[in-house]
Amino acid sequence: MNKHLAIVTGHSRGLGAAVADQLHAQGWQVLGISRKPRAAPFEEWAADLADPLPVAERLQAWLAERQPARLLLINNAALVTDPGPVAGVPLAALSASLRVGLEAVVLLSGAVLAGAARCPDLRIVNVSSGLGRRPMAAAAPYCAVKAGMDMFSRALQLEGVRVTSLAPGIIDTDMQVQLRSGDPSRFPDVARFVDFKASGALQSAEDTARRLIDFALRPDFDREPLSDLRQV
Ligand SMILES: NC(=O)c1ccc[n+]([C@@H]2O[C@H](COP(=O)([O-])OP(=O)(O)OC[C@H]3O[C@@H](n4cnc5c(N)ncnc54)[C@H](OP(=O)(O)O)[C@@H]3O)[C@@H](O)[C@H]2O)c1
């Protein structure tokens, strides 16, 4: 068995797909977790992280049978609700946003920390956002998820866990399509997101993944519990 194991949530597209593919190309054993597998050349679990408990239990049991020398958990999956005031967001969408973006992060981290407790090099990278550090109207659930993720990382570090919450910058993915397609009457910042694309300000997922992996493998990746890929 490959002794270098990476677990990447949200590996089906966007940043997570690029991270999982690049780690696989570098020789890592990769486990990708998303709702829609994509016939990737590595192990994939089709799982809805809006219901994270069974996934975390499965992961903990799966890890108990493995002894990786190096383990990297990349909590990348997240979703934005359609931008607008919370009052207009269906309750089920609010719940999914919180559960995928935060509950799954906490449960999968717990599963990995317990299931691979003897791993000598266990690292967690939580993919955060500038919006966890500065609020934006029409994205309250997403801001709350990322702020919660940041505090989770800060508190975990106090337990001695090697973790960082990493804001990756703005990336040309489906999430940006969703944001710039928002209804201007409900989303005051929509023009900014339209401009990101028009002005060429978006980073590619591939380049962001390359920099994220380089950072995650640095000896000092967890020097700070909160980090920003644009400043490392
Ligand atoms: N794009 C940006 O500009 C930007 C900026 C700052 C931070 N980020 C962060 O970067 C990370 C990646 O974002 P992205 O732009 O690559 O997003 P994306 O293109 O929308 O991809 C999201 C990924 O999450 C997975 N996912 C969503 N809901 C899920 C669910 N219920 N269960 C399991 N997996 C689920 C999706 O897979 P399935 O649909 O197959 O389930 C997909 O693989 C996120 O944490 C995001 O918050 C992005």
Image (cartoon, helix red, strand yellow):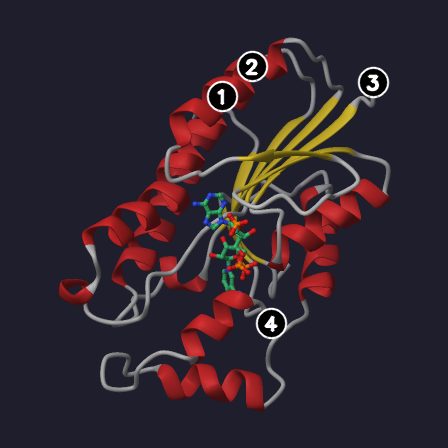
State the mark number for residue 1.
3
Frontmost of labels 3 and 2 is 3
Q: Residues within 10 Å of mark 2 (few under 14, many from 20)?
A: many
What residue is at 56 percent from the left and 14 percent from the top? 115
- Counting residues from the start of the chain, the first of labels 3 and 1 encountered is 3
Q: In the image, residue 158 lies at what x, y percent?
A: 43, 29
Amino acid type, residue under disc 1 in the picture: Ala
Q: Secondary structure at mark 2?
A: helix
Label 1 – label 2 distance at C-alpha: 6 Å
Left or right of 69 in this view: 205:
left
| Residues at marks 2 and 4 touching, judged by CB atoms closer than 8 Å | no
- Counting residues from the start of the chain, the first of labels 4 and 3 encountered is 3
What residue is at 57 percent from the left and 31 percent from the top? 162
82 is higher (above) or lower (below) than 185: above
Amino acid type, residue under disc 4 in the picture: Asp
State the mark number for residue 111.
1
Quadrant of the rendered image containing residue 211: bottom right
Label 4 – label 1 distance at C-alpha: 31 Å
Q: Residues within 10 Å of mark 4 (few under 14, many from 20)?
A: some
Q: Which residue is mark 4?
A: 172
Q: In the image, residue 6 lies at what x, y percent?
A: 69, 33
* Disc 1 CB within 8 Å of nearest ligand 1 atom: no
Left or right of 107 in this view: 122:
right
* Disc 4 CB within 8 Å of nearest ligand 1 atom: yes
Label 3 – label 2 distance at C-alpha: 17 Å
What residue is at 66 percent from the left and 9 percent from the top? 65
Amino acid type, residue under disc 2 in the picture: Gly
Q: In the image, residue 205 lies at what x, y percent?
A: 67, 63
Q: In the image, residue 143 lies at what x, y percent?
A: 32, 58
- Counting residues from the start of the chain, the first of labels 3 and 2 encountered is 3
Q: Secondary structure at mark 1?
A: helix
